[in-house]
């Protein structure tokens, strides 16, 4: 964590981060990553910053990604916000939305009722007034079943090649079909897929809301589940770009959880598209792909860019005959995990994502593709078009669909 703060000395005030910041470009409430990051940090040696504008940073990480001098701007801001929250307190709303697995466990047995409530305007208006979650904010549908329970009853064929699947909260409670498709694609490529039981939340929503101590507890529990597989030499793949990035580096860099098991798990962690492209580069990926005559916009989420792996989804799409991909040049969809759910930040999130949403509407397409679950939900809410993970298109092209 001290290394992150030390990086601010490399800031030469070139303002590249200001130029790319999606939030400061749409609202005066956030003066920009340079101001609240390396510039303000120099005055936060003994006292917590009194500047509440810091909390309007969405944590998208674009500033760190574009900085030519390696200043960890987003990470500095995240740590400073945690200090701010420790002094001023964390609202009940933030404590609730920062624990998606807890909320989902409670809602899954009554999924039809929970989904009805999420669509009911009077209920959403009441929630906005009492808790502060915007009535129009994108909320996922509860699947009513858990992927982890399906995986327990679905023994993967015994194979020499083995890989571990870290599914995360979203697949377990909201998108179990994505998990099933991921396993089908990996099995089609000759893998035995191991799904460790009792996978908990990675702690990223807690980190994003300034609840660092709770986030550290979550990440340590998760690492204790995955570490035995990493020690045995198995690679781990994730379909959530943000959760995978948390294990790769953010838990160490931002939370300061720096133990041997986390480093080992992080060294074995791959984004699913990154992993599949790696197989292709080594000539190990099956290319028996059928045509998909479809025109589809693709948005690479902020967290995916944080991996530093390029755009592996585009490389996979290029293997699918007749699939025309429209690459989005928009930096951010605005939602930034839980940021766009908040009453006071919803409009900012929508303004950030407006160029992306307008481009999708103008393209006159049937669906979109994106690697991040919260971004997919944001895009679908804003455009009324389904947004799918890149794996789903590969799944279809392989002919693995049950329909």
Image (cartoon, rainbow, N blue to C red):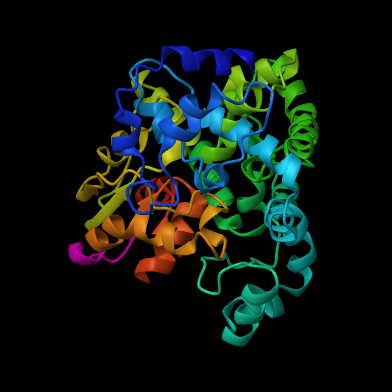
Q: Nearer the viewer, residue 35 or 140?
A: 35
Residue 365, quarter of picture:
bottom left
Residue 248 falls left or right of residue 65: right
If the image is split into quadrants, where does the C terminus sit? bottom left
Q: Residue at x 77, y 37 (%)?
A: 218
Residue 401 showing in the rendered view:
no
Check the image and report above or below for 346 versus 5: below
If the image is split into quadrants, where does the N terminus sit? top right
Q: Residue at x 48, y 24 (%)?
A: 38
Q: Find residue 349 and report its horizontal and vertical position in percent.
A: 43, 57
Residue lying at the far bottom of the rendered structure: 122
Check the image and report above or below for 34 versus 153: above
Residue 246 showing in the rendered view:
yes
Q: Find residue 305 and report its horizontal and vertical position in percent.
A: 40, 33
Q: Residue at x 78, y 60 (%)?
A: 105
Q: Find residue 339 and report its horizontal and vertical position in percent.
A: 54, 53
Q: Residue at x 29, y 41 (%)?
A: 317
Q: Nearer the viewer, residue 58 or 267?
A: 58
Span shown in magenta: 361-367
Residue 136 falls left or right of residue 98: left
């Amino acid at each position: 964590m001290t290394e992150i703060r030390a990086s601010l000395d490399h800031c030469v005030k070139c303002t590249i981060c200001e130029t790319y910041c999606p939030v400061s470009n749409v609202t005066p409430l956030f003066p920009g990553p340079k101001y609240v990051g390396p510039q303000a940090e120099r005055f936060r040696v003994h006292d917590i910053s009194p500047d509440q504008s810091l909390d309007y940073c969405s944590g998208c990480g674009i500033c760190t990604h574009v900085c030519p001098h390696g200043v960890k701007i987003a990470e500095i801001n995240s740590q400073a916000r945690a200090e701010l929250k420790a002094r001023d307190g964390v609202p009940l709303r933030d404590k609730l939305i920062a624990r998606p697995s807890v909320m989902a466990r409670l809602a899954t047995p009554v999924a039809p009722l929970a989904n009805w409530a999420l669509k009911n305007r009077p209920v959403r208006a009441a929630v906005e007034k009492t808790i502060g979650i915007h009535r129009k904010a994108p909320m996922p549908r509860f699947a009513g079943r858990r992927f982890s329970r399906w995986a327990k009853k679905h023994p993967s064929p015994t194979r020499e090649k083995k890989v571990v699947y870290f599914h995360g909260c979203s697949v377990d409670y909201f998108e179990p079909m994505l998990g099933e498709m991921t396993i089908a694609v990996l099995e089609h490529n000759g893998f035995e897929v191991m799904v460790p039981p009792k996978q908990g939340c990675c702690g990223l929503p807690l980190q994003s809301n300034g609840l660092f101590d709770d986030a550290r507890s979550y990440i340590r529990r998760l690492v204790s589940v995955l570490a035995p597989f990493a020690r045995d030499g198995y690679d781990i793949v994730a379909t959530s770009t943000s959760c995978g990035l948390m294990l790769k580096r953010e838990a160490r860099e931002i939370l300061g959880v720096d133990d041997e098991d986390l480093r080992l798990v992080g060294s074995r962690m791959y984004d699913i598209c990154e992993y599949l492209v790696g197989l292709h580069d080594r000539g190990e990926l099956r290319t028996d792909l059928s045509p998909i005559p479809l025109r589809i916009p693709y948005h690479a989420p902020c967290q995916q860019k944080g991996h530093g792996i390029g755009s592996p989804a585009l490389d996979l799409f290029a293997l699918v005959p007749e699939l025309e991909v429209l690459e989005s040049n928009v930096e951010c969809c605005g939602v930034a995990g839980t940021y766009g759910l908040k009453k006071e930040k919803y409009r900012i999130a929508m303004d950030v994502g407006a160029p992306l949403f307008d481009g999708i509407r103008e393209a006159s397409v049937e669906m979109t593709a994106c690697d991040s679950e919260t971004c997919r939900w944001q895009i679908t809410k804003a455009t009324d078009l389904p947004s799918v993970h890149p794996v789903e298109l590969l799944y279809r092209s392989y002919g693995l669909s049950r329909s």
